Image: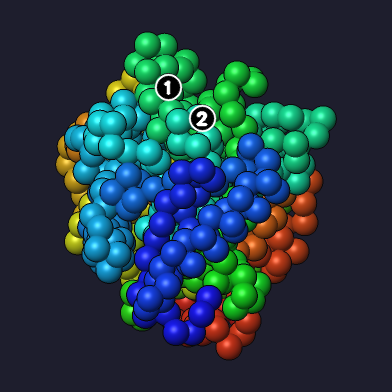
């Protein structure tokens, strides 16, 4: 482009149906337009219908949907993101529509996307062309995003994203596509994903007319992709390289329409070690198999920790809560732990962490994350699952990845009178039902995991530090901990508390 250009403009050339940036030089605008038309004719002669350039959408034709949460910290982060998007739109002298998903309606289950689609479809009438979904950690360059979207016809069904795929068949995906797990791609929510108007409107009608029958929401990004694909009746995910997770160079960064924050949230100093009380659920048959793994790995970073079993064993030591062991559910044991936490029998810590004896967790990373939350509020934190969300169900923190409760949350829960319907009821789901009845949200963190690292895409896990994993099946748990959860020595806080019944010195452990 000529250096003497004084005014940048955008021309639409109907004959080649593309937007082209050009410049109007003083005294020679027709030469510029002729050059643009010639360029467009060349471009059109080379492109295929699939990659044809379409009219670049305006910012107000894209509905930005932030997959936000009700918790105070997350609501504030979502609002900051909304203001960032507004600011970008204003700099382009345009308006934009930004929706925080937790504000869309009063229904807490909108995070599972499908219940929200009918509401989103009527949000802006015929004006909208695209719906762009993003997390609070997603960074968006609107101008670049609009250029990317111009490659696709919003009147057709498009499902766009940064692709993930399973490295091996996974239990959390019910071993789908076991013959070739990598053949099915689903979006990395952190990089953002988009639905064309045509696709979202069809899905919204489908949800209204024929609600899906699935009971559980486990890995939403995979389940959304399956629902959209519909056994081949709908579109598969179309990879968009400009939806970036971790750019490898400055040049890559310049091409990206989106990027993602890949470090742990920074809300100040980590909470103190003594502010977290750790409860490990175990039973006699696992005393010699699993407890040594806990002690040799993450328990060394705990000050207040108790092992709860069906048998008192002074060599560990364990605490017998008087609740018979059950093969599943463990609801009776979990509620006994909640009551003990408030009873004065243990340290009056701000936070309660309940884990299984085959959970591996990074307590230093957890303490850093907890600095973002207020223990005076009823906080329930971990990996969020859902049950019956399309039919006004409830959300819950799945137990295997670790359940974190503020002291305020435990107090609200127990004072409500909500209890197990049987000792072997699923504790995490009962807790979710109780929280739902009380109107208390459960807060999701993608850093907690119900399964092993092998059950998740390696690229997904590698993008940022993780907090927990679950299960020792077919893995070396010590090696798994060292690879995924152990920080370098210079990043770790030394535990120096004196050992008592619930305090343990590192050497003693």
Give the quadrant of residue 491.
bottom right
Name which residue lies at 24% across and 63% down: 93
Whole-number angstrom distance, CA of label 2 to CA of label 1: 9 Å
Name the foreground residue: 424 vs 210.
210
Label 2 packing within 10 angstroms: few (<14), some (14-19), many (20+): some
Q: How many marks?
A: 2
- Where is 280 relative to 426, above or below? below
Residue 126 shown left or right of residue 155 in the figure:
left
According to the picture, the residue beneath numbered tag 2 turns out to be 157
Name which residue lies at 56% across and 33% down: 225
Q: Residue 471, percent across and down?
A: 65, 46
Label 1 packing within 10 angstroms: few (<14), some (14-19), many (20+): some
Q: Closer to us: mark 2 or mark 1?
A: 2
Name the foreground residue: 9 vs 145.
9
Q: Is residue 346 visible?
A: no
Element class at badge 2? loop
Name which residue lies at 35% across and 46% down: 62
Mark 2–mark 1 CB contact (< 8 Å): yes
What number is the disc on residue 202? 1
Q: Residue 59, percent across and down?
A: 32, 53
Q: Residue 110, percent across and down?
A: 32, 35
Name which residue lies at 46% across and 22% down: 215
Q: Residue 485, percent across and down?
A: 61, 66
Name the foreground residue: 81 vs 172.
81
- Where is 350 relative to 413, above or below? below
Q: Residue furthest bottom?
A: 490
What number is the disc on residue 417? none
Element class at badge 1? helix
Q: What quarter of the picture does the C terminus occupy?
A: bottom right
Sequence-first tag of 2 and 1? 2
Q: Is residue 415 visible?
A: yes
């Amino acid at each position: 482009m000529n250096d003497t250009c004084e005014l940048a403009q955008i021309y639409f050339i109907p004959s080649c149906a593309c937007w082209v940036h050009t410049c109007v030089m003083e005294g020679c605008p027709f030469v510029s337009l002729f050059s643009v038309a010639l360029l467009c004719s060349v471009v059109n002669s080379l492109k295929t219908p699939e990659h044809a350039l379409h009219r670049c959408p305006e910012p107000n034709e894209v509905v930005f949907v932030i997959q936000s949460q009700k918790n105070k910290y997350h609501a504030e982060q979502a609002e900051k993101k909304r203001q960032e998007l507004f600011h970008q739109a204003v700099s382009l002298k345009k308006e934009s529509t930004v929706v925080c998903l937790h504000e869309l309606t009063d229904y807490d289950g909108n995070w599972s996307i499908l219940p929200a689609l009918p509401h989103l479809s009527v949000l802006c009438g015929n004006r909208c062309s695209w719906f762009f979904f993003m997390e609070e950690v997603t960074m968006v360059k609107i101008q670049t995003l609009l250029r990317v979207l111009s490659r696709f016809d919003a009147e057709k069904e498009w499902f766009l994203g940064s692709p993930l795929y399973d490295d091996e068949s996974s239990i959390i995906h019910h071993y789908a596509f076991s013959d070739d797990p990598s053949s099915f791609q689903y979006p990395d929510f952190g990089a953002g994903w988009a639905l064309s108007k045509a696709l979202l409107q069809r899905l919204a009608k489908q949800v209204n007319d024929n609600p899906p029958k699935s009971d559980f929401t486990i890995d939403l990004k995979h389940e959304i992709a399956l629902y959209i694909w519909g056994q081949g009746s709908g579109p598969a995910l179309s990879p968009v390289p400009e939806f970036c997770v971790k750019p490898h160079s400055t040049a890559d960064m310049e091409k990206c329409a989106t990027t993602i924050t890949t470090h742990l949230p920074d809300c100040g100093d980590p909470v103190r070690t003594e502010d977290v009380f750790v409860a490990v659920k175990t039973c006699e048959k696992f005393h010699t198999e699993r407890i040594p793994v806990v002690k040799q790995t993450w328990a060394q970073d705990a000050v207040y920790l108790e092992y709860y079993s069906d048998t008192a064993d002074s060599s560990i030591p364990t605490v017998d809560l008087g609740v018979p062991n059950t093969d599943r559910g463990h609801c009776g044991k979990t509620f006994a732990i909640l009551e003990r936490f408030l009873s004065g029998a243990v340290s009056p810590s701000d936070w309660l962490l309940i884990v299984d004896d085959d959970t591996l967790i990074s307590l230093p990373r957890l303490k850093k994350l907890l600095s973002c939350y207020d223990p005076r509020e009823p906080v329930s934190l971990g990996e969020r699952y859902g049950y019956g969300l399309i039919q006004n169900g409830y959300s819950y923190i799945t137990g295997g990845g670790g359940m974190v409760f503020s002291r305020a949350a435990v107090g609200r829960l127990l004072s409500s009178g909500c209890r197990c319907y049987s000792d072997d009821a699923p504790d995490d789901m009962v807790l979710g039902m109780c929280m739902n009845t009380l109107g208390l949200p459960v807060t999701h963190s993608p850093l907690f995991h119900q399964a092993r690292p092998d059950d998740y895409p390696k690229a997904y896990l590698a993008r940022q530090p993780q907090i927990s994993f679950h299960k020792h099946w077919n893995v070396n748990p010590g090696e798994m901990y060292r690879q995924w959860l152990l920080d370098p020595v210079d990043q770790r806080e030394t535990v120096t508390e004196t050992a008592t019944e619930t305090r343990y010195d590192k050497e003693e452990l």
